[in-house]
Amino acid sequence: MQQRNQSEIVAERLKRQGLTDPLFNPGDETSYLQLFRKLQPMSPVHFTRPGDPPRLVHRTIYSDFGVSSSIREQGKLVKGRFQGGRIAYVLEEDLKLYATAFRKEMTRFGSIHQEILALIHESGGLSKDQLKEELPYRPGDIGKALEDFQKAFILYEQQTDTDWDTGWLDFAEEWFQIPKDPENRQQAMEEVILRFTEAMVFATESQMKSWSGWTGKQIGSLVKVLTEQGKLRRAEVHGWDQGVICEGDPILEDMPAGAIDAPLVPEMIWMLDKSDFLVRAELDELKKRYEGREVLQYLLVDGRFQGAVIGHWGFRDYDIEDIILELPEGEAEARREQAISAVRKVYDPEHHTILKYNGLPL
């Protein structure tokens, strides 16, 4: 079993996901799409408008809202429900893979579902507001039925801009029929796990479960098959749970395990929201760690989650109640301004007062 050290894994992970090697040219759409492909499915930033495009937060030195919006408007990003039903986007050429892997069968099909489908088939597509006008059901029930269809990739929500009143179309007519046989789904799930592991460099089954929304049993079965096929290699990292690395990953060849000249992780703090790829991979554990607190965002300190931003989100101005940095007292104090600066990149002082740092009033 291959043994690695944390610093080389974390350094390569940060580089591979664009945090320490961010994109610098807003005109380089090819590089943007290549990085997007590694991190998909990508949701809009948490606590923003549902119609906003997904963002490569901290992975570009420019604001990528316009770039992402333009790519979506061109039809290269497709909206759907993945990873247990989350709204997210994938590249058009990868839609079949992720839709097959994450498709959720409908467990109920009532009269409201039948009438929605009939109306959309008759008209060729309708907005949610038009459905509300045509159907004798509560708006919330119509929304829930549309969500059922979206999770099953029976209906498709056409979102090309930030408009709230989007069109709903038949997915198969707009795109293709999703394969429903177990073999195709198994192959798609295996490929998704391989892509996730490649982006993570080293991944544990608990991270796969947290990120994907699949059950522990499903993840265990996928990892077993992929290791038996020789596509994943089991590995150990000191201080972490046992995990896997993709067979043939350059990190297995570039440096002997345990080498003393392993790449150093930069001393940086990034504030990441709940839609972020890295947060999703650790979210199950992070929820337990900060249970009972209202977390706005998490703090990635030197490549590891070691803090959180606490507060009650609102549509108008609201306070940051506390910035928690889980470091030894002296180190936490020494890095106070760095942590506050990371938070201030999103929460400006005009609209958000920071009340405490590690429990002490500022």
Image (spheres, rainbow, N blue to C red):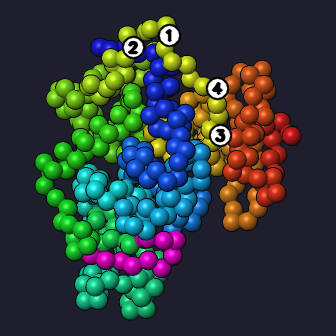
Kind of residue sitting beneath label 1: Asp
- Residue visible at 25% across and 52% down in the picture: 97
Kind of residue sitting beneath label 2: Met
User: What label sits on residue 267 in the rendered view?
Assistant: 4
Q: Secondary structure at mark 1?
A: loop
- Residue bearing the label numbered 2: 255
Q: Which residues are magenta?
A: 159-170
Precedes in sequence: disc 4 or disc 3 = 4
Precedes in sequence: disc 1 or disc 2 = 2
- Residue bearing the label numbered 1: 261
CB within 8 Å, label 1 to label 3: no
- Of residues 351 and 181, which is closer to you in this image? 351
Distance in Å between CA atoms under marks 2 and 4: 22 Å
Q: Secondary structure at mark 2?
A: loop
Nearer the observer, disc 2 or disc 4? 2
Kind of residue sitting beneath label 4: Glu
Q: Secondary structure at mark 3?
A: strand
CB within 8 Å, label 4 to label 1: no
Q: Which quadrant would the C terminus be assigned to in this image?
A: top right
CB within 8 Å, label 1 to label 2: yes
Distance in Å between CA atoms under marks 1 and 3: 31 Å
Precedes in sequence: disc 2 or disc 4 = 2
Classed neighbour count for the residue bearing mark 4: other residues with Cα under 10 Å, few (<14), some (14–19), many (≥20): few
- Residue visible at 68% across and 57% down in the picture: 313
Q: Position of residue 83 (x, y in %)?
A: 37, 51
In the rendered view, would you say 119 is above or below 76? below
Distance in Å between CA atoms under marks 3 and 2: 33 Å
